[in-house]
Amino acid sequence: MNKKVLINLQIDTMRIAQLVSLQESVPPKGKNGLEYMVYYLTEELVSRGHEVTLFATSDSVTSARLIEILPYPMSRGNLFGLTSTHYALTVITKAVEMAEEFDIIHSHLGSPAYYFPNLIDTPIVETVHSAHRDVACIKQEKHLQRYCVDRKSRFYKLHHTFVSRSQKECFAPASNSSVIHNGIKLADFTFQSEGEEYFAYLGYLTKEKGAHFAVQAARKAGVKLKLAGSYYGCEAYFDNEIRPYLKKGQIEYVGVLDPKERNEFLGNAKSLLFPIDWEEPFGLVMIEAMACGTPVIGLNRAAVSEVVKNGKTGFVVENIHEMEMAIKNVDLIKRADCRNHVEKNFSVEKMADSYEKIYQKTATNFRK
């Protein structure tokens, strides 16, 4: 970045690079997650007049300038037999080569980003999307501290944003950090004043996501459950924990959904079950469901209590027994309250407002 240009910059419009890891396209096909957040943010920033460049796969769809790094994402096949870290390094290396073209580089890559701030004159904002992170130096033994000094200095030159308060609390403290909740484009989600007689599970069908807990709770409550999402790489789990309980009209697997199908699936559900069994940083599907008017019943892990307003937009429960009870009481939730909660707290406009402030603050501090 040319510092002279930044000094004269009015900050009304900025040249912003958005970096994703190439694990998925933008937006992703058949899943939710950070690539959707990047898609929403990128489109909103472009609509506000910013010059946005997206570093992603060739099959990504964007209004921004697209720098095509690979023809398709790692989830569709590993082109060169590389690790996910190598894919991320491919992206950040290209962005660093072009750094003078940007006022801000916004990385969604994870650890590789903090190896580069001393090499360029462009500030980096990093959004941490992972649940666990090697922040600066995991081992704290005194005889190792002198080897971490340089690493820590580079780490703290980035501004780190976390997608939930609970996620930030899991990490080593960083003075140069903030929390910005994920947001979605409300127009993409149709409000339904009434749901049908089924409960929904949407996401990867894995042990960590708790798909089997959703099955157990639905069976105990005697309600119909539809599960949607991929179980690629977790075939044994699906065969052992899900498939034996599938029965038409009771527990059904409906496959991987496209955005239109996802909207209808969530909007027509009586409630979304979100029984996570890991420290999920956010859980985008929760706000997508509530945007459709669909209450969320989630286990009290990670950011669930930040996203769901207990007793107002769903229920935050401690175990499967409580989830069963919540299923039976879900009609107490007003679907309009769910939509209003997302409009007020989790819109793409609010998310973009927050990132614009961080970009401005980071750029200002960088030139001091």
Image (cartoon, rainbow, N blue to C red):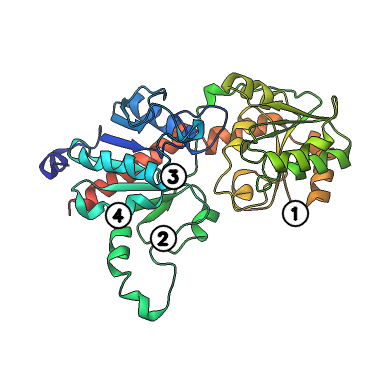
Q: 214 or 328, which lies in front?
A: 214
| Mark 4–mark 2 distance (CA, rounded to whole Å) | 12 Å
Disc 2 residue crowd, few under 14, some 14–19, many 20+, Cα 10 Å: some
Mark 1 or 3, closer to the camera: 3
**Which residue is found at the position 32% from the left and 41% from the top?**
90
| Mark 1–mark 3 distance (CA, rounded to whole Å) | 34 Å
Mark 4 or 2, closer to the camera: 4
Indicate the secondary structure of the residue bearing disc 1. loop
Drawn side of residue 99 relative to residue 225, left or right: left
Name the kind of residue labelled 1 in the image: Glu
**Going from the N terminus, do you reach mark 1 or mark 4 first?**
4
Question: Where is residue 55 drawn, in percent x and y?
Answer: 33, 33
Q: 208 or 126, which lies in front?
A: 208
Pick out the residue farthest to the top. 260
Name the kind of residue labelled 2 in the image: Val
Disc 1 residue crowd, few under 14, some 14–19, many 20+, Cα 10 Å: few
**Which residue is found at the position 17% from the left and 54% from the top?**
368
**Which residue is found at the position 19% from the left and 48% from the top?**
120
Question: Where is residue 121 drawn, in percent x and y?
Answer: 18, 48
Mark 2 or 1, closer to the camera: 2
Location of the N terminus (image quadrant): top left
Pick out the residue farthest to the front. 81
Give the number of the disc on residue 115: 4
Drawn side of residue 200 relative to residue 79, left or right: right
Disc 3 residue crowd, few under 14, some 14–19, many 20+, Cα 10 Å: some
Residue 314 visible from this viewpoint: no
Mark 2 or 3, closer to the camera: 3
Seen in the picture, residue 250 relative to 235 is either above or below; the reply is above
Give the number of the disc on residue 135: 2
Question: Where is residue 334 drawn, in percent x and y?
Answer: 72, 32
Which residue in the protein does label 3 denote? 84
Indicate the secondary structure of the residue bearing disc 4. helix
